[in-house]
Image: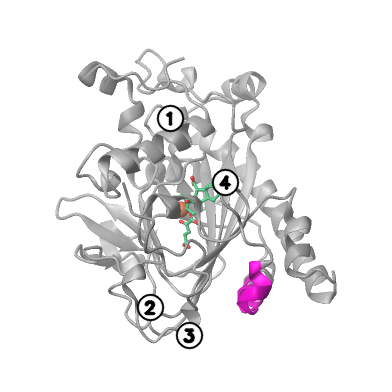
Amino acid sequence: MPSQLNKDPHNRYFDLGAAREVPDTHAWDGQHELPVVDGGVGAGDDAVPVVDMRDPRAAEAVARASEQWGAFLLEGHGVPTELLARVEAGIAGMFALPTPEKMRAARHDGDLYGYGPPLIASYVSKNMWSEGYTLTPANLHAEFRKIWPDAGQHYRHFSGVMEEFLKEMRSLANRLMELFLVALGLTAEQIAGVEAEHNLTESMTETMHLNWYPKCPDPTRALGLKGHTDSGFFTFVMQNQVPGLHLFRHGPPADRWVEVPAVPGALIVNIGDLFQILTNGRFRSVYHRVVVNRERERISVAYFLIPPADVKVAPLKEVVGGGKPVYRALTWSESIVVRKEAFANHGADLEFGKGRTALDMLSISSDEDDGAEHHRD
Ligand SMILES: C=C1C[C@]23C[C@@]1(O)CC[C@H]2[C@@]12CCC[C@@](C)(C(=O)O1)[C@H]2[C@@H]3C(=O)O
Ligand SMILES: O=C(O)CCC(=O)C(=O)O
Ligand SMILES: [Fe+2]
């Protein structure tokens, strides 16, 4: 089990922005050994796929990228670039506040929302080189009132920008869900049937995680966000013009990290674990991490689309067709428990291709292999 002894769960006593060195509490040995490849347009097979939603063949591009990478850059999505710039500026301003002001919104043990490190931080013994803030549309105002109790101009401006962002992102998420279903080869009639039966699009919930990755004096010892897969259906990531997001790619020729380029106006889409289950393994959830650098701070927002926490997600019968379901049904809450157990039992690198992944633990064949019972209906 990871030791919590040397860990300060909120980076509370350590000012990352002012640090002159990476202390042991933030040092991740052995995490910078694999090659890192630039995933820009000239990278051949390692170029991160780009999907333009305005392209009449967008569904084919989504299918290819989701099967082969579990991630893609999204253009032509309709969210105004100038709004994304205001979101970025607002987030940068918020994280630049003095620590005691941000700490007014600090998440306490067991809380899902608030200012502080992400969920998986509690599964590992080292601290990451980042600050985070987890929010939902429902608690946005209450959260920001903790940071700006006077409800003054900063509060009103930032709340307004984030509300606009959330509205645009929800509309985009709904449109992308439909494109995913088309990409799976479903007819309009089948899509209507899936929606009537599961209410997938309307019922998915939204969570945001704002990230600030300060400049780091020794990036080869630090990690902005350790490797993980997102748990939900899919995630949009908006990043500033500072690359740092790495997607894991298995060899041949060699296991490697591919760095997602910073493309102005583009959003990144990551497939999450529950989408891999819903699509019976056809669309892959992507293992990814964030690195930091010496020169420039990085800002990002991850916007997660997640089914209601207690709704069972199972492979769609329209996708399984005449084949067999690869995964048994499970809820988002159960998936979080499975991932936590996987971290505890198989070590933090389990998704790294060395051991069994959290999703492997849910596959029906894994029951047959080891007779284990995991969250069977
Ligand atoms: C809804 C959620 C997804 C998330 C866990 C959370 O409850 C809120 C934070 C999210 C986040 C952001 C950073 C990476 C991640 C793996 C984590 O630890 O917290 C994701 C979670 C997830 O996708 O499971
Ligand atoms: O900062 C990024 O680019 C990605 C963040 C991320 O993976 C997450 O919040 O889940
Ligand atoms: Fe992520």
**Tag nearer the camera, 1 or 4:** 4
Residue 362 image position (x, y, % from top left) = 36, 27
- Establish if 271 lies above or below 73: above
> What is the chief secondary structure element of the magenta stretch?
helix
Name the mark nearer the viewer: 1 or 3: 3
Labels 4 and 3: the sequence-earlier one: 3
Q: Is residue 96 above or below residue 79?
A: below
Q: Nearer the viewer, mark 2 or mark 3?
A: 3
Q: Earlier in the sequence, mark 2 or mark 3?
A: 3
Instruction: Give the magenta-colored segment's residue range.
Output: 89-103
Q: CA distance from mark 1 to mark 2?
A: 35 Å
Q: To which quarter of the image does residue 75 belong? A: bottom right
Residue that label 2 marks: 293
Given the current orientation, which residue lies at the most extreme left position? 253
- Amino acid under disc 1: Ile
Q: Secondary structure at mark 1?
A: helix
Decide: marks 1, 2 in contact (CB < 8 A)? no
Cα distance between the residues tagged 1 and 4: 27 Å
Q: Residues within 10 Å of mark 1 (few under 14, many from 20)?
A: many
- Circle 4 crowding by C-alpha within 10 Å: few under 14, some 14–19, many from 20: few
**Left or right: 346 as drawn, with respect to 70:** left
Amino acid type of disc 3?
Ala
Per the model, the C-alpha gap separating discs 2 and 3 is 14 Å
Q: Label 3, secondary structure: give it.
A: helix
Q: Residue furthest front?
A: 5
State if disc 2 and disc 4 touch (CB < 8 Å). Answer: no
Viewer-closest of 328 and 348: 348
Other residues around mark 2 within 10 Å, as few (<14) / some (14–19) / many (≥20): many
Q: Which mark is residue 110?
A: 4
